[in-house]
Amino acid sequence: MNRRLTCGVAIIALLVAGCRKAPSIAPHLLTDSARISVIPAPVSMTRSRAPSYSIKDSTTIIVPAAASADVTRVANMLAFQLRAPTGFALPIVVDTVAPSKAPIRLRLADRTDLGSEGYALGVTPDSVSISAPTAAGLFHGIQTLRQLLPFRIESEFFELAGKNWQVPSLVITDKPRFAWRGAMLDVSRHFFSVDEVKQYIDILALYKFNVLHLHLGDDQGFRIEIKSRPTLVSAGDLQVGGGPGGFYTQSDYGEIVRYAADRFITIVPEIDMPAHSNAMLRSYPQLSCGRRAPAPYTGIDVGFSALCPDNDSTYALLDDILRELAAMTPGEYLHIGGDEVKALTKEQYIRFIERVQDIVTKHGKKMVGWEEVAQARLLPTSVSQQWQTDSAHNALSQGAKLLMSPGPKAYIDMRQNPYAELGLRWAGINEVRTSYDWDPATYVPGATEANIIGVEAPLWSESVRNITAAEYLAMPRLPSIAEVSWTPQAQRNWDDFRKRVALHAPRWRLLGINYYPSPQIPW
């Protein structure tokens, strides 16, 4: 795996007092004139007429004297990102040490205007400063600094010709529009190794996503070890098209969770139920109320399987699964699926969802479900993930939040053109402009921005066998969804975005990221 991706780092910068005041410049104007290509576009960016800042062999990375472990980790990741391509030592020092020339300074600041994940970045000819209320904000700031540097900063090797590592003088103040900025990876229909998931996490970190939703259980495979129910992974180990899939041991899953947390990304695990459960039912066929008996399944049809809602043993099994999953998941949420249930009555379905919601709550978590769950009684802490957008009223009337993933806009497993070999087409052809040109706050009638917890881009893996294929479907649509979920609607512009994202292709090539060369982008 590419070492720079594994590291998943970035670079930092922040607000500095000595920056000469200049008129605010819209992100697209700044980009056109100076080839600045930050994605997602910042809330505010003001360019100075002062000379650029240059990283030098005397540059140090300065952290507060009482820096937390999280802040120190951010500084270390920044240093790792910069050392190989620049060839500079870039030591990390505390701010009590006499400052060096051209320092990069990280600090925590009490800035209520930046929320919990925002940052301020200032660049002068003499220094770079990044300040934020939290370490997460500092991490997002280093992603912006990374994108402001020449693309060869992504190189694993000392760049002999790249001595001039410049960042334009500017001031950025930035924070996310939505709290949940997510991507989903389906590891059930085709399995992805721990290293492949890490590669996906690194892409998410670069574009300031903060949630990775892992679809761990479906008809083809059950992908997470449950120690109290060990047969789940052995009986449910197939994938689309045939052949063994694989599964994560609890140690593997813990490694993924830690790797994501180091990049301020939360893992939200999903075990789909009561339908999409054939793999689970191969171990427990007596719990099936589906339309056919559980058997090895490697196709892509849906809706034929169902856990029986009238059997207490069903809930004993789910209690074991959700208890162990909750114990190894630090985040707030467990996703219980709940979609495409064709083998149960409405009454059975509602009874099932409400009982599972109680199990999730009992284990100290909040429930997320696909939008069909809004037929049931939802707690105000529950989240309804909108993929068809025809049930939002039920969720909103109960005080639940919406997570926006409309198929025609956010499903990045849809084909980018009618002739593509990868991807499905049930939600239409989804080119990069389609994934960019929509407003989550106006997409669902009756919903406002206050009702929406965030945006998520699902990538289902019926046609996706490895991370290279996943990247081809995801890029450049993941950066477009990143901007939808981060940048204020009034400041987004398609023509601006297409020019900025075109400048990211050289970075992707150095990082080994596959992508679709959309004809809509001026590569």
Image (cartoon, helix red, strand yellow):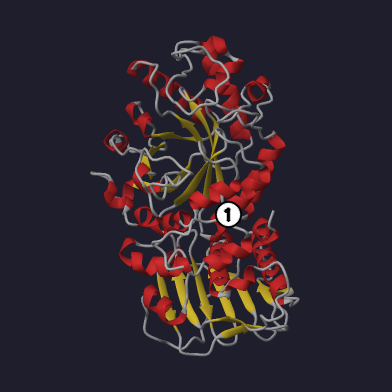
Residue 9 appears left or right of 463:
right
Q: Is residue 9 visible?
A: no
Residue 235 appears left or right of 313:
right
Residue at (45, 11) in percent of width and height: 310
User: Residue 33: image x %, image y %?
Assistant: 42, 82
The quarter holding residue 255 reads top right
Which three-letter amino acid code belongs to the residue tagged 1? Answer: Phe
Q: Nearer the viewer, residue 236 or 464?
A: 464
User: Residue 357: image x %, image y %?
Assistant: 45, 27
Where is 308 relative to 481, above or below? above
Where is 299 relative to 454, above or below? above
Farthest left residue in view: 445
Please state the total of marks drawn on the protein image.
1
User: Residue 70: image x %, image y %?
Assistant: 65, 59
Residue 23 appears left or right of 464:
left
Residue corresponding to mark 1: 264
Residue 22 appears left or right of 235:
left
Q: Nearer the viewer, residue 132 or 456?
A: 456
Q: Is residue 296 visible?
A: yes
Residue at (67, 35) in percent of width and height: 248
- Neighbor class of circle 1 (other Cα within 10 Å; few <14, some 14-19, many 20+) is many
Q: Secondary structure at mark 1?
A: loop
Residue at (34, 43) in percent of width and height: 428
Q: Nearer the viewer, residue 309 or 416?
A: 416
User: Residue 76: image x %, image y %?
Assistant: 70, 65
Where is 439 relative to 45, above or below? above
